[in-house]
Image (cartoon, helix red, strand yellow):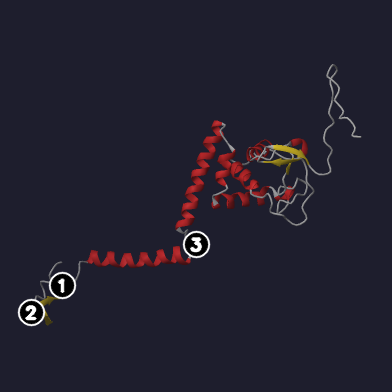
Amino acid sequence: MTRNDEDNSPLPHNYDGIEEYDNPLPFWWVALFWVTIVFSVGYWAYYHVGDGPSILQAYDVDMKQYYDQQAQAMAAAGAITDDALRGMQSNGAIMATAKATFGARCVVCHGEQAEGKIGPNLTDKYWLHGGRLTDFFRTISEGVPAKGMISWKTQLAPAEMMSLAAYVGTLQGTNPANPKEPQGELYDPASSTSAPSPGTTAPATTTKPGDPAPSTPPAKS
């Protein structure tokens, strides 16, 4: 610190023989001190009172960016898997974004609660085009033009379609009000087998010329 040469006399107090001079702090130090006070007030107002993101929110944004990059790389390499889509389901930020995408793009046909309207019910165990997460991604990406399902690959990025497919996988068993009747085949993830939905008839077995006739079990006496 710089002593004040204009007034070289000590202050009128003494502590154990220690004298003190009234030497002001340098201007740059005082200015910096006040800047830190003003900054701290603004920081508190933005992050604790205003709309500033919390640490968890910033983490979710970073993870979403990471998944977006991974999704683009996997889509380019053709390596989109059920495990990759399942991993997205554990990220709250990605699922929140996918829910918003669903609300903006899908509720017109599938309903606010995915209960089914023009399109099928997405909350039961019956599926028209496969019940795996990768089946959902393919349907979203390629569409089903014959049934009015458009292809979204020209309007949504690969990461958006992947997160949307993952989100659809979380809807099963949500039990919405007034669900549409089941359509398609029952999907069993344990055995990866399908069965016709209730009210449908299984396809008849056909026999080609030259094949042995189907055997008939003997009648019980």
Mark 2 or 3, closer to the camera: 2
Residue at mark 3 = 51
Q: Residue at x 62, y 47 (%)?
A: 167
Q: Quadrant of residue 184?
A: top right
The single residue placed furthest to the right in the displayed view is 221
Note whether 199 is above or below 213 in the view shown. below
- Residue 104: percent from the left, percent from the top? 66, 50
Labels in figure, total: 3
N-terminal of the two: label 2 or label 3?
2
N-terminal of the two: label 2 or label 1?
2
Q: Amino acid at mark 2?
A: Gly
The reply to whether residue 129 is visible in this rendering is: no
Marks 3 and 1, Cα distance to the nearest angstrom?
Answer: 43 Å
Marks 2 and 3, Cα distance to the nearest angstrom?
Answer: 54 Å
Q: Judge from the rendering whether residue 31 lies leftward or rightward of residue 200; answer left or right.
A: left
Q: Amino acid at mark 3?
A: Asp
SS for tag 2? Answer: loop
Q: Judge from the rendering whether residue 164 lies leftward or rightward of residue 64; answer left or right.
A: right
SS for tag 3? Answer: loop
Residue 50 is tagged as none
Q: Residue at x 83, y 40 (%)?
A: 200
- Residue 168: percent from the left, percent from the top? 65, 46
Q: In which quadrant of the rendered image does the C terminus lie?
A: top right
N-terminal of the two: label 3 or label 1?
1
Residue at mark 2 = 17
SS for tag 1? Answer: loop
